[in-house]
Amino acid sequence: MRVVSSSNEQLGIISLQEALEVARNEGLDLVEVAPKAEPPVCKIMDYGKFQYEKSKREKEAKKKQAKVVLKEIQFRPDTADHDYQFKMRHAREFLAKGYKVRSVVRFRGRQMLHTSFGREVLHRLVADVKDVAEVELGPKMENNLMALILTPKTS
């Protein structure tokens, strides 16, 4: 196996016993870094320190990830015009802040027979926010809900 020392110097291709002896003399661990290489590559290092630094890097990378916020606005098939306008303004505010918006029309009882009314509400919403949003997922029925996902427009 090819062995790299703790100071990143190539020790060359040596046997497993020799590599373990060198690692013991330095008081460190022998860690296989590239098992699929020909010959396999091992490094002499402090494995606990290596794991700790790896977890620190992963946590730092996680902090820098952008979190996607999904806001939900609910309608009914018979939502009054003023209520619709109020909710539509909220959707525009959420989209302006960069959030995704899930618009839901909830049907109850006999309203399930007239899902076209709910589809009209969602199409009206899409038309009213088309200058600031794009449709990510079109109107789709899920049990007694019809849902639509809007994302902010990328300029």
Image: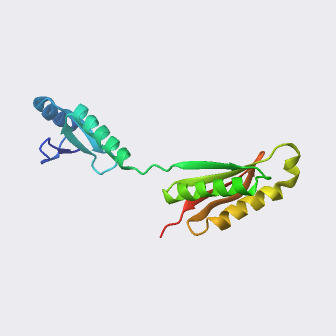
**Front-lying residue, 142 or 26:** 142
**Front-lying residue, 140 or 1:** 140
Residue extending furthest toward the front: 82
Quarter of the figure that contains the N terminus:
top left
Tell me where residue 136 sits by quadrant. Answer: bottom right
**Front-lying residue, 96 or 2:** 96
Indicate left or right for 85 with 57 as reference: right
Residue 26 position in % (x across, y down): 11, 32
Callout count: 0
**Front-lying residue, 120 or 90:** 90
Q: Residue at x 25, y 39 (%)?
A: 53
Q: How is the protein colored in the picture? A: rainbow
Residue 24 position in % (x across, y down): 15, 29
Indicate left or right for 26 with 97 as reference: left
Q: Residue at x 64, y 50 (%)?
A: 73
Residue 40 position in % (x across, y down): 28, 46
Residue 44 position in % (x across, y down): 18, 38
Tell me where residue 94 sits by quadrant. Answer: bottom right
Image vertical order of residue 28 relative to residue 130, above or below: above
Q: Residue at x 34, y 48 (%)?
A: 36
Tell me where residue 32 sits by quadrant. Answer: top left
Q: Residue at x 25, y 31 (%)?
A: 48
